[in-house]
Image (cartoon, helix red, strand yellow):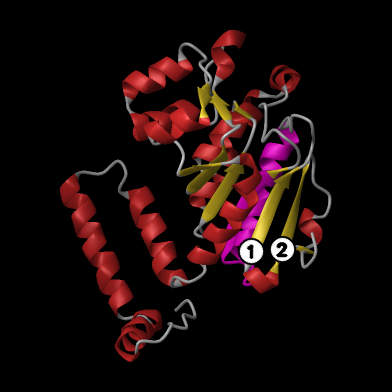
Amino acid sequence: MTGYEFVDHRLSKLDGFQVEIDPAHERADIILNRPPFNIVSMPQRDQLRLAFETLEHDQRVRVIVVRAIGEHFSSGGNIAGFMEATPETVSKLAWNIASPARCSKPVIVANRGYCFGVGFELSLACDFRIASDTAQFALPEQKLGQIPGSGGSARLQKMIGITRTKDIVMRSRRIPARQALEWGIITECVADKDLEAATDKLVDELRTFAPLAQRTAKKLLNDTEDSTLTIAIELEGHCYSRLRQSDDFKEGVEAFDAKRPPKFVGR
């Protein structure tokens, strides 16, 4: 894509995906590139973690997009790799795939076609899921005599409840995009031809907000997902108080009073 740059030498030799940066739009793209099904290898999982950790510290990047080449986001992992991997490697699967959630920057995933297994689990770890109307979501591990191992069933249960999660996990059901939207699994469902445009639009929208406030909101929401209401409100108050001292909040108030667009700097 024109206007994109590679990140740095640590991400120059990747297994099944690539990372590109568009400094003009403060955007980084993590692009699955093993068509037609973008099967995720074992080494690729650890490299995905490295990619998010690298982009975390890249000052050119405000928003990260995860997308794929071809008509399918990912049909899942390399099945043979599970039998070859050591127990230590397997024990890190969920940690690696949770990298989008740990990253302080907003992460958008663009899904089309198959979004199965680890492809679905990676998507669930992102903040915003925009799906083409061709997308299908599934955790098919029961057909292999297994269960999801990278956070899929746990994240789904938090999102949609135990009844619907059992329906997906225990029956290896495929959920079409429109149903995923109705159930609250995805953020937005668009026509296949509009997937890229919808993703670009959300990137541009997120860039208008204060970086520090966005990072704070993401961490607060993640950290309080399992907490009681009392603790969540207490932590929200502390975060609000901290942001009250920020330069961006001062700029936001001044811009509001002056009826002009704010110029946030992230501090």
Q: Could you say whether the residue bearing mark 2 is in a helix, strand or loop? A: strand
**Magenta stretch bounds:** 42-67
Left/right of residue 179 with respect to residue 200 in the rendered view = left
What's the residue type where badge 1 is placed? Arg
Left/right of residue 113 with respect to residue 177 in the rendered view = right
Which residue lies at the image location 59% right of the left edge and 26% below the top edge?
A: 117
Q: Tell me the residue that label 2 is attached to.
A: 21
Counting from the top left corner in percent of width and height, residue 183 is at 38, 31
Can the viewer see residue 145 in this picture?
Answer: no
Residue 79 figure quarter: top right
Q: Tell me the residue that label 1 is attached to.
A: 27
Mark 2 or mark 1: name the one nearer the start of the chain: 2
Q: Are discs 2 and 1 less than 8 Å apart at CB? A: yes
Crowd band around label 2 with a 10 angstrom C-alpha radius: few (<14), some (14–19), many (20+): many
Which residue lies at the image location 32% right of the left edge and 84% below the top edge?
A: 256
Q: Quadrant of the C terminus?
A: bottom left
User: Is residue 253 located in the magenta-colored stretch of the structure?
Assistant: no
Q: Could you say whether the residue bearing mark 1 is in a helix, strand or loop? A: strand
Which residue lies at the image location 19% right of the left edge and 56% below the top edge?
A: 233
What's the residue type where badge 2 is placed? Ile
Left/right of residue 69 with respect to residue 101 in the rendered view = right
